[in-house]
Image: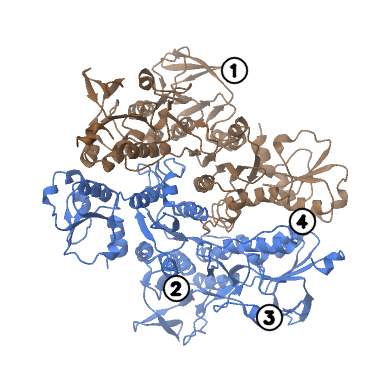
Chain colours: A blue, B brown
Amino acid sequence: MTEKEDYGMRRKIVIVGGVAGGAATAARLRRMDEDAEILLIERGEHVSFANCGLPYHIGGEIEDREKLLVMTPAKLRSWFNLDVRVRTEVVAVDREKKEVELRHNASGEVIRETYDNLVLSPGAKPVVPDLPGVDSEKIRTLRNLLDMDSIKALVDGGITSAVVVGGGFIGLEVAEQLRRRDVAVTLVELLDQVMPSVDPEMASPLHATLRDHGVDLRLGTRVEGFKENGAGIGVNLSDGTTLDTDMVLLAVGVKPESDLAQAAGLEVTDRGTIVVDEHMRTSDPDIYAVGDVVTVRQKQLGTPVWLPLAGPASRQGRVAANHIAGKTPDRFPGVVGTSVCRVFELAVGSTGLGEKALKEAGVAYHRQYVGPFFHADYYPGAVRITVKVLFSPTDGKLFGAQVVGAGGIDKRVDVLSTAIHAGMTVFDLEDLELGYAPPYGTARDPVNFAGFAAANRLRGDVEVAEWQDLVDEEDSMLIDVRQPEEVEEGGVPGAVNIPLGVLRNRMKELPRHKEILVFCGVGQRGYYAYRVLKHHGFKVRNMDGGIMLHRMVQPPA
Amino acid sequence: MTEKEDYGMRRKIVIVGGVAGGAATAARLRRMDEDAEILLIERGEHVSFANCGLPYHIGGEIEDREKLLVMTPAKLRSWFNLDVRVRTEVVAVDREKKEVELRHNASGEVIRETYDNLVLSPGAKPVVPDLPGVDSEKIRTLRNLLDMDSIKALVDGGITSAVVVGGGFIGLEVAEQLRRRDVAVTLVELLDQVMPSVDPEMASPLHATLRDHGVDLRLGTRVEGFKENGAGIGVNLSDGTTLDTDMVLLAVGVKPESDLAQAAGLEVTDRGTIVVDEHMRTSDPDIYAVGDVVTVRQKQLGTPVWLPLAGPASRQGRVAANHIAGKTPDRFPGVVGTSVCRVFELAVGSTGLGEKALKEAGVAYHRQYVGPFFHADYYPGAVRITVKVLFSPTDGKLFGAQVVGAGGIDKRVDVLSTAIHAGMTVFDLEDLELGYAPPYGTARDPVNFAGFAAANRLRGDVEVAEWQDLVDEEDSMLIDVRQPEEVEEGGVPGAVNIPLGVLRNRMKELPRHKEILVFCGVGQRGYYAYRVLKHHGFKVRNMDGGIMLHRMVQPPA
């Protein structure tokens, strides 16, 4: 409790940054403390706008720009009695005097304000790599409404081509929206996959879909520089080619805007993110930080993680406000990390730890794939989706999950996220009761299926092999147990087709001295075949994920 | 282990009923025991058909009838080496000799088969109340493909009207599909609400939607009898009126088909369901029962419950098979009960315990409503949904949840079901990380919102009043804190409009001697107003669920 409170004076809180975390902090703080003086300082023109909606207005999917203004300064003032100051930058923090220096951007006027508590929510800004020609007017980034307006103006003005650099959320969403406007799009990505939040094979269906929609996808390709040429710009790639285009969007990631915090001497990580405790307090207990600028705890590993997403930012704002108000012992519990993204008719999502994080942490894991229909297969629109779960080989604890496909992806991601938050095992997934009606699901939901398959494995009811590991085909025989008409649509070179239905009658064709590797479309009939052959004494394993995974691991050129 | 096994002989299992639970048992059993002799006996013509899809073929939404045949006898034979016998009825069980008596329906031939284990999966059949004239050909029930075919033939033949008796899943789904075929539908329901799996106010939006789509809804109305009149049939109602119609569908519930079990002396409940242990064993340890015929354990209360749904039936079949095969100590953990149903553009779902069950069990609970957008409000198609959570007033443990609305209902039901399975509290719901992309969700998902609202209450940050309890308006003053333009679209009689934005300036208008009850659209601004007024010493409560809930509790006539 500060001295001011002891004397019944109004506490004064200055919040730096009026979007997402900052606005959430301010609104919650007012609810917890009607008396406090709350200043919300925003450098830009808009507070609390819908960052995640920006790409969709460029493409016209969100027609009305006004809809992106979640909260206006006027509303924040009248509802929450906040002192909102836009186009105003906090240029310095004097921790000793507990003062900030504010500069009004238009007038250049500088004033000082005291604070009892300071909350930093400056966010993260797009990375602009130091490349030749990167200063061109033709190169854009997308962070706020003004960026959006300028890109939309170019599209409205009739540009016919664009190069999107970076295949993360923003790059993919903008690429989709530009295609929607009939702009020719080349997507250049340094990695061999887009959407680095999922493991490589899970991104593979996105590559096919992007290409189907006319996106010229350049994976494993580095941008080396830019050069304006008349009305357009040339983008020089690591493969020696140059792309001539009307516009470039740089979407190669973001970096925390922690300059102010660093100048104030607050503790930051090597990456430049601000270090906070579970109450979102920085190394100065009077100063809090929330949102895309902070490092938090990865819940499962207990290690620091930087996860610049809107959901956690909002929750962190709430925690900081609660703690400042002294009302509750609220703690930010850390994150498991959950995200979802639409890419044309597909969606992709992930929750918890991926293979890279598990390997880095030295955690042993199994991976399991299933490919069930996302709702009743007899109901119109049924398609198969791919669910991947990562779990403990010993007790079955669920570490992570990734889902990709053309229906019901967000639902399965959220259910699996909830399961991870609860510390569930794959055995628990078997018993989840998930709503079944033909338009929404099946009697055995994809999440149950993932549980069954993983649990079968842990119980020793099946042994699996993985396409990823398949090297020596000399010692093994590949058996495709699908129907001949399915095999005609594409199979695996060297595999012998013995449909499940006749397997019991054709076992004499199978070798006893070789390992038999069975597979089907997604892994289910392969498992049935495994059970038959195993019983009859064959050395056998089921190829996990079947042809579905084969295509994801070794996509056709 | 039986003697047969000791001598290496094949074990023989007879399964009665080839749909859902029976087929699941047989398929799993084969995987666990390649040697066993497995007889799957089905009285009807079809095994393993899609019960839940039947209404949708009547309406033509599922065009291809073949799609409803999930598994054919031929496929079950070839994939799983099952001895499938359709059109065959098990007419008696001789537990002493461990034999069943089978009658082939067409030929009338009777034979006996021995068994080591018997699995009963006879399902449940539609209740046909003992009413005058109920034997008419114009009165139908819907259980299997033949029922479906005959109803579809009537519709194809050009009937123009139908009376659906019963507003549960099947009644609602058939009513919707008949409207799709332009058949005039009257839905007669004994209770004051349709969909008894949710609490009355949560069914209220369904009533409006049914009426919007031309369904003549007769709630609180009993059918007293039927009388054929020329080409049609008259349906006599308890209100003295008679409905003349072309066809009647009876969908007033199902009852367990336990005659065979009862004749065999197996233990059944008063309701006629078979009593089983956690391995799905009946009172005779050689006989198992699964699916719609058994009573299982309500997971949260530990009490017996009858929940005839496809998901649990399938899971029970798996448990029974595992236990028979002696492979794993698999247990059926009981059910919390999760269901979802589409009703025209709405969906409704529930999980866990409802108010009726909580009251019967004598469990103290709070209820909390929230009305957030199901995905980003700035993204096209955004509508508000209603989420109701029931939770412990002491520790916040989640008891049950119900969701209704026009988008993303199935997802929230499944997330909340997973939370209940995990034993989560409303505080845990605050911290769930649910995927946010504009087409799928919001930075604070509706499930998070439910957690925030419930947790605010338990932490004492808000006190709520409920429209359900509002009786004496003398002692209180109702304040509508919405904008005047919202109030014009409908408010609460007697309420005074003071928009949130001007509340701080108009507090002098408010009485100190009366309780002030604030409300808004869904409860959020009401909560903000509560915080302001409470701070200034007023006696105040927020009307939970706002106008949204007011309309659900007191729907306009």
Residue denoted by label 4: B501
Measured Cα–Cα span from mark 2 to mark 1: 68 Å
Q: Picture coordinates of residue B55 (x, y %)?
A: 41, 33
- Front one among B527 and B31: B31
- Looking at the image, residue A119 lies above or below residue A544: below
Circle 4 residues within 10 Å: few <14, some 14–19, many ≥20: many
Respond whether the residues carrying marks 3 and 1 are from the same subunit: no
Spatial separation of the CA atoms under disc 4 and disc 2: 43 Å
Which residue is at the front of the view, A30 or B18?
A: B18
According to the picture, the residue beneath numbered tag 1 turns out to be: B239
Question: Real-space Cα distance between discs 3 and 4?
Answer: 36 Å
**Contact? badges 2 and 1 (CB < 8 Å):** no
State yes or no: discs 3 and 2 in contact (Cβ < 8 Å). no
Q: Are marks 1 and 4 on the same chain?
A: yes
Mark whose residue sits in front, 2 or 1 = 2
Amino acid at circle 1:
Asp
Kindly indicate the quadrant of the structure image that contains residue A335.
bottom right
Q: Is residue A386 above or below residue B169?
A: below
Looking at the image, is mark 3 or mark 1 nearer the viewer?
Answer: 3
Q: Please give left or right for residue A424 compared with residue B70 in the image.
A: right
